[in-house]
Amino acid sequence: MKTDKSGFTLIEIVIVVAIVGLLATLGSLGYTKAMHNSRVNVAQSELEMIAAATLQLAWDTGKWPNGAWRNQAASGNNEVSDLSDGPLFSISDADLYPGWQGPYYEGSLVDPWGQSYYFDSDYRVDGENRIVVGSGGPNCSRINRYDSDNIYVFLDD
């Protein structure tokens, strides 16, 4: 007696599941890379706007966000680790920033990884001190932790 069995064999099911799993893995990797790239692009874009605002502050007042004169070399404690409480938004003492005409920036001062953007007037790049606004990047490194994923914009070009 002959029986007609219709359906898929175990091998066919295993192959289909393996292919679906492979496609899901590739899609997941592509999504992760796209999210990483978009966060880097957002940080770069925000830093460009913060850099323009910081330069405008320096042109108007002659001072950087750390209170140092724009035309003097960096010395001492010259970093501002959180720009949100500085002169880009408001000032509490007009004598500290004569000529202040802000607010200079009203966007986000927190990078896509949840860390504050910073100002550093002696950021080390290729053995040279540069004035930058920056982000610790995906690994969230902070000021004076120079590594390859930091995102920054030069203010002294």
Image (cartoon, rainbow, N blue to C red):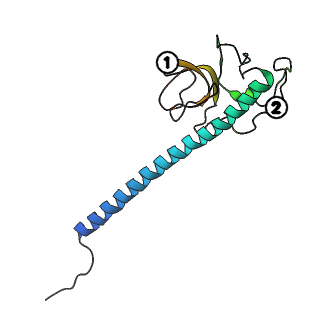
Q: What is the CA distance from the residue labelled 1 to the residue labelled 2?
A: 34 Å
Compared with 35, 117 (above or below) is: above
- Where residue 8 appears, as percent x and y from the top left, is 26, 74
Residue 23 visible: yes
Q: Determine which of the numbered discs, if any, sits on residue 127 in the image.
A: 1
Q: Residue at x 80, y 26 (%)?
A: 60
Which image quarter: residue 89?
top right
Q: Residue at x 39, y 54 (%)?
A: 26
Secondary element under disc 1, as helix, strand or loop, is loop
Horizontal side of residue 30 vs 131, given as left or right: left
Q: Give the amino acid at mark 1.
A: Gly
- Label 1 vs 2, first from the N-terminus: 2
Give the residue pinned by disc 2. 102
Q: Residue at x 73, y 16 (%)?
A: 69
Horizontal side of residue 141 vs 49, given as left or right: left
Which image quarter: residue 112?
top right
Q: How many numbered badges does the structure rendering display?
A: 2
Q: Residue furthest bottom?
A: 1
State the residue in front, 23 or 101. Answer: 101
- Where residue 81 appears, as percent x and y from the top left, is 65, 24
